[in-house]
Image (cartoon, rainbow, N blue to C red):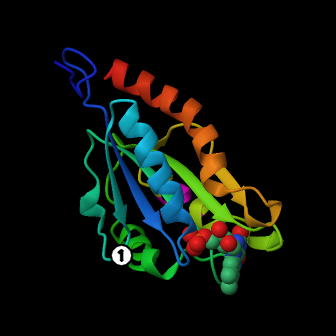
Amino acid sequence: MFSLWSGKNQMKKQIKILIGTMTGNAQLVAQELELRFDGEGVAVETVDMDGLTPEIFEMDCIYLICTSTYGQGDVPDNARSFVEALDSSRPDLKNLRYGVIALGDRTYAETYCFGGKRFDELLNSCGAGRIGDILMHDASSGTMPEEEAADWSQEWLGLCESVWSHK
Ligand SMILES: Cc1cc2nc3c(=O)[nH]c(=O)nc-3n(C[C@H](O)[C@H](O)[C@H](O)COP(=O)(O)O)c2cc1C
């Protein structure tokens, strides 16, 4: 029978995509990746950041932060309380692995993709380890974020596979 477990004594193939969005682009990206990861036999869940607390983090799951940027390099409103809670509590996340998709717009040259970068800094400062490079999507480029994310996710998922096979 098909199994979500990658093998004996190995980590369950599980990804939670955490969504920070104002106008829905990050949601579209997450939905696209949910379909793709599901097709690869991964147990995947998308979660809006509204009202999230650091208790969401479980060490046997890989997290994918998918967030846009607003204001002067801020995270979107629905991600604010989550960022504040992480910043003030600084939980020990040294066994946590995560990836980041940062949506932004290069016309905001000083704060390009700062929302995703903020999460990366915070998680890194809590000891978590990033898988792969941050995907930064530029809304002024004319490309669709969900298409760029789908391309990026192939390599990223490959890196996740090696994490799962070494756990
Ligand atoms: C009012 C406003 C402010 C923004 N500020 C920034 C910014 O400081 N830096 C950046 O890289 N992108 C900025 N953006 C671009 C958005 O992050 C980008 O359009 C993104 O794709 C929106 O994704 P969402 O629909 O998931 O919220 C801003 C967009 C708007 C409308």
**Residue 104 sits in which quadrant?**
bottom right
Residue pointed to by mark 1: 50
In the displayed orientation, state which residue is furthest to the left. 1
From this view, report whether residue 13 is shown above or below residue 109.
above
* Residue at 19 percent of width and 18 percent of height: 9
Q: Main secondary structure of the magenta part?
A: helix
- Between 73 and 93, which is closer to the camera in this rendering? 73
Q: Is residue 119 visible?
A: no
Magenta residues span 118-122
> 136 left or right of 13?
right
Where is the N terminus found, in terms of image quarters? top left
Q: Is residue 147 visible?
A: yes
Residue 94 in percent (x, y) is at 36, 43
Ligand number 1: quarter of image = bottom right
- Between 28 and 104, which is closer to the camera in this rendering? 28
Does the stretch in magenta take in 147?
no
Task: Name the secondary structure under disc 1.
Answer: loop
- Between 45 and 77, which is closer to the camera in this rendering? 45
Total numbered badges shown on the rendered structure: 1
- Between 143 and 132, which is closer to the camera in this rendering? 143
* Residue at 56 percent of width and 77 percent of height: 23
* Residue at 56 percent of width and 32 percent of height: 154
